[in-house]
Image (cartoon, helix red, strand yellow):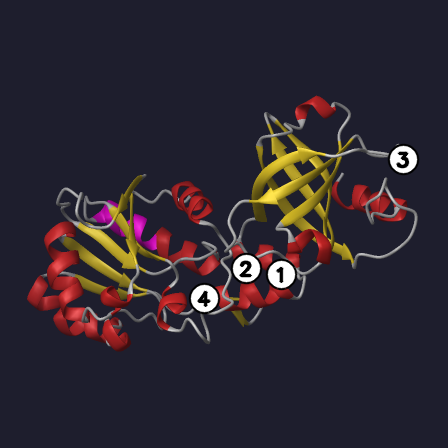
């Protein structure tokens, strides 16, 4: 997958199939759109293209209201990785500014999309808008399609278990700790990445390693405080464990990882780790602790039953 930061360094494409959107989370609905533009690109002997935006438009347009406390489901790096996994050919990351938000839908197509991408098809997701004052939508694309010579196509609303799949619903489910629902919406495990730092394992014989995981991106959304069953991809194996998100830990943008592994050397202290979240077990509670951290032995046993 080719990644471009803005339109300046793009060599003109031919027969591209284009869609736009923030695509935070790269969830089930996004994947439906990505699959469609891949198939259309193959039919038109062209390339699939996503035009995405950073920072999130709400953070720029509504900094004191809707965007003030908005956190992201995926970091830029995570989004790039997920999009590449979906087989996207080209990703254009546009810096979203107040000035950019004032560009009309027509000028966006005429000055950027058409001269650089030469689209055969432009695909709009359900209820998606673009351009100044959200004036661009599927109906607008249909109106201007003959002038520019492309086909306009709309992807219908996608649903799971009768609930609309949207980044907003995923953020809500994360805030409430419903990780299994989040994973269903995403069609992949919700995960976080960060730098691992080994800490003293003072009194717990049932685990091999305890780490603090420092979250690198301040915009990354953490799940509801609690204790979670997690897994950790490492080399050619999967290390299983639990993650603790507590008030004192999350305030420092850290997650405590308790890992169960016969060979602790497989867990790379000082490296970037990725945690896949499986299920929220319970709140952070008092009880017999693993060392000086609030992880009761009963919780460790329950986590092992869930993920082994």
Picture quarter with the N terminus: top left
Residue at position x 33%, y 70% in the image: 128
Residue behind mark 3:
203
Badge 1: residue crowd in 10 Å (few <14, some 14–19, many ≥20): some
> Which tag, 4 or 2, sits closer to the chain's start?
4
**How much space separates mark 3 and mark 1, taking CA atoms?**
35 Å
Q: Is residue 171 above or below residue 44?
A: below
- Identity of the residue furthest to the right in this view: 288
Residue at position x 57%, y 41% in the image: 194
**How much space separates mark 4 and mark 1, taking CA atoms?**
15 Å
SS of the residue under disc 2: helix
Indicate left or right for 164 with 248 as reference: left
Badge 2: residue crowd in 10 Å (few <14, some 14–19, many ≥20): many
User: Residue 165: in sight, yes or no?
Assistant: no
Badge 3: residue crowd in 10 Å (few <14, some 14–19, many ≥20): few
Q: Are marks 2 and 1 in contact (CB under 8 Å)?
A: yes
The label nearer to you, 3 versus 1, is: 3
> Which tag, 2 or 3, sits closer to the chain's start?
2
Q: Position of residue 151 (x, y in %)?
A: 18, 62
The magenta region covers 36-43
Q: Is residue 250 above or below residue 137?
A: above
> Which tag, 3 or 4, sits closer to the chain's start?
4
Q: Which is nearer the eye, 267 or 178? A: 267
Q: Are marks 2 and 3 in contact (CB under 8 Å)?
A: no
Residue behind mark 1:
181
> Which tag, 3 or 1, sits closer to the chain's start?
1
Residue at position x 82%, y 33% in the image: 201
């Amino acid at each position: 997958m080719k990644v471009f930061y803005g339109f300046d360094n793009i060599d003109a494409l031919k027969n591209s199939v284009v869609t736009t959107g923030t695509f935070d989370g790269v969830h089930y609905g996004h994947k439906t759109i990505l699959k469609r533009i891949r198939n259309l690109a193959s039919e038109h002997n062209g390339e699939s293209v996503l035009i995405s935006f950073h920072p999130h438009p709400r953070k720029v347009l509504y900094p004191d209201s809707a965007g003030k406390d908005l956190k992201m489901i995926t970091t830029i790096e995570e989004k790039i990785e997920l999009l590449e996994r979906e087989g996207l050919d080209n990703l254009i990351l546009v810096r979203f500014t107040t000035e950019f938000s004032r560009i009309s839908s027509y000028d966006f197509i005429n000055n950027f999309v058409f001269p650089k991408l030469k689209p055969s098809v432009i695909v709009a997701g359900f209820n998606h808008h673009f351009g100044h004052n959200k004036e661009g939508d599927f109906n607008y694309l249909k109106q201007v399609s003959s002038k520019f010579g492309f086909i306009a196509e709309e992807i219908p609303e996608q649903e799971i278990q009768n609930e609309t799949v949207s980044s907003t619903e995923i953020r809500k489910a994360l805030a409430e700790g419903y990780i299994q629902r989040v994973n269903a919406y995403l069609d992949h495990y919700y995960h976080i990445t960060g730098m691992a730092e080994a800490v003293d394992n003072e009194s717990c014989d049932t685990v091999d390693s305890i780490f603090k995981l420092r979250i690198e991106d301040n915009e990354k959304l953490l799940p509801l405080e609690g204790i979670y069953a997690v897994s950790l991809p490492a080399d050619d194996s999967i290390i299983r464990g639990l993650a603790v998100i507590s008030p004192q830990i999350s305030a420092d943008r850290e997650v405590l990882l308790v890992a169960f592994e016969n060979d602790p050397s497989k867990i790379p202290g000082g490296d970037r780790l990725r945690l896949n979240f499986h299920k929220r077990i319970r709140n952070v509670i008092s009880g017999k602790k693993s060392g000086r951290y609030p992880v009761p032995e009963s919780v460790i046993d329950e986590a092992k039953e869930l993920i082994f």
